[in-house]
Amino acid sequence: MKLTTKKISLTLATLLLVMLGAQRLQATTDVDIDVTQAHTMNRQGALLLDVREPSEYTEVHAPNATLIPLGQLGARLDEIASYKDKPIIVMCRSGRRSAKAVHLLQEAGYSHVSNIAGGILAWEKSELKVVRPN
């Protein structure tokens, strides 16, 4: 089989794209932590940041969680500026919005940001303490 320069270039380009995609996926999953890790980190002083909407937070939230909805996070970074080089654990309902928040925080220069895989749903399922209205 005769390989042309064009075929070799196409094969190399495809391989590079696959490798970059795998690297990007790895970078995304590296910031995911489970609720047990998150709980321990929070007890050790990490900021627990809840990026859900106020109505969701009022319904149920983790103790010590700070609420800044995802849609407001970019405009309210000054409120958590003291954590720029300290651990921040981000939580939402299931882990999707918090993953977006992690990316936003990393882009803003926050260096120790983690996403709670499974969000408040996983937190409750693990039977960790939550706050609910009376």
Image (tube, rainbow, N blue to C red):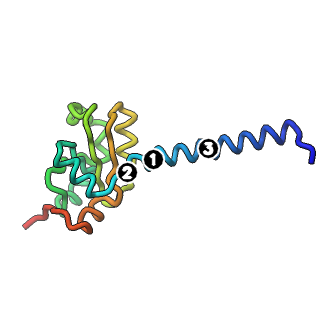
Residue 53 lies, in percent from the top left, at: 26, 54
Query: Which residue is the site of mark 3?
Result: 19
Structural crowding at the residue carrying mark 1, measured as other residues with C-alpha within 10 Å and reported as few (<14), some (14–19) or many (≥20): some
In which image quadrant can residue 83 be found? top left
| Left or right, 107 with reference to 7 | left
Q: Cα distance, mark 1 to mark 2?
A: 7 Å
- Residue to which mark 1 is pinned: 28
Q: Position of residue 76 (x, y in %)?
A: 25, 37
Q: Residue at x 17, y 42 (%)?
A: 45
Q: Earlier in the sequence, mark 3 or mark 2?
A: 3
User: Which residue occupies 35% across, 31% down?
Assistant: 109
Type of residue at label 2? Asp
Find the distance from the CA under tag 1 to the CA under tag 3.
14 Å
Q: In which quarter of the view is residue 58 placed?
A: bottom left
Query: Residue 17, how many percent across, how many down?
Result: 65, 43
- Element on which disc 1 rests: helix
Tell me the quarter of the image containing the C terminus.
bottom left
Q: Are marks 1 and 2 in contact (CB under 8 Å)?
A: yes
Residue indicated by mark 2: 32
> Reading the chain from its start, which is encountered first: label 1 or label 3?
3
Helix, strand or loop at label 3? It is helix
Which one is in front, 6 or 68?
Answer: 6
